[in-house]
Image: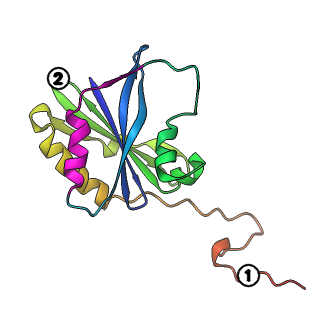
């Protein structure tokens, strides 16, 4: 089975390389490809990791945090900043089928995989039809914005829309 991960962050597709550790774990690694979602080459960029061999990564004593290559490629420091505007497409390819699971922020503000959004393809659709369909889905599906929470007794207008406080 091969695994590919593609993120949509704001208006960019973020495609990290995937390597397998000696223990058999699939981890994100450099290089990370960034592409605006409206670019015509997006299906080709999605198709490349779909057909690339899985890299082997030696185990490292140093732990830079989970999948930090994505944050580094985007110039971000915190996962929270990334997650507020992101979706994850995880592609599992077996000998008989291709399944795509979409994960993102739900209405409750937590990240979750929504199995009702799963895309399935026959193996013979790999990689051309899969890459084309994914490029269209990535361009059209928007991440759910962070939910505005109204605290009891708090303002009904989101804080970003309140007039600035004046110093007395």
Is residue 29 magenta-colored?
no
Of residues 15 and 157, the one nearer the viewer is 15
Q: Furthest-top residue in view?
A: 23
How many marks overall?
2
Say which element carries label 1. loop
**Residue at figure coordinates x 42%, y 14% from the top left:** 22
Residue named by callout 2: 95
Tell me residue 50's x, y (percent).
23, 36
Task: Find the residue positioned furthest to the right.
Answer: 168
SS under mark 2 = loop
The quadrant of the image that shows the N terminus is top left
Seen from this angle, which residue lies furthest left?
A: 124
Q: For residue 115, what is the image quadrant?
A: top left
Rendered-image quadrant of the C terminus:
bottom right
Which residues are the magenta region?
41-57
Label 2 vs label 1: CA separation?
58 Å
Q: Residues within 10 Å of mark 1 (few under 14, many from 20)?
A: few
Residue 15 % position (x, y): 35, 44
User: In the rendered view, would you say 1 is above or below 70?
Assistant: above
Q: Which mark is residue 11?
A: none
Identify whether 136 is placed above or below 67: below
Residue located beneath label 1 in the image: 164
Q: Quadrant of residue 130?
A: top left
Residue 51 among those drawn in magenta: yes
| Rendered location of residue 158, percent (x, y) | 64, 72
Q: Is residue 141 left or right of residue 77?
A: left
At 68% from the left and 79% from the top, the residue drawn is 162
Quarter holding residue 152: bottom right
User: How dense is the environment of label 2, judged by Cα within 10 Å: few (below 14), some, or many (20 and up)?
Assistant: few
């Amino acid at each position: 089975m091969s695994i590919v991960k593609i993120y949509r962050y704001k208006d960019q597709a973020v495609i990290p390389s995937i390597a397998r550790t000696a223990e058999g774990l699939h981890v994100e690694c450099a290089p990370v490809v960034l592409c605006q979602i409206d670019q015509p080459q997006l299906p080709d960029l999605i198709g490349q990791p779909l057909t690339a061999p899985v890299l082997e990564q030696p185990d490292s004593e140093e732990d830079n945090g989970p999948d930090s290559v994505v944050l580094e490629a985007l110039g971000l420091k915190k996962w929270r900043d990334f997650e507020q505007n992101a979706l994850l497409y995880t592609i599992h390819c077996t000998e008989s089928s291709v399944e795509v699971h979409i994960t993102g922020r739900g209405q409750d503000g937590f990240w979750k995989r929504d199995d009702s959004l799963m895309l399935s393809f026959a193996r013979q659709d790999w990689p051309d039809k899969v890459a084309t369909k994914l490029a269209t889905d990535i361009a059209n599906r928007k991440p759910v914005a962070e939910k505005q929470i109204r605290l009891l007794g708090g303002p009904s207008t989101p804080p970003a829309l309140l007039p600035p406080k004046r110093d007395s």
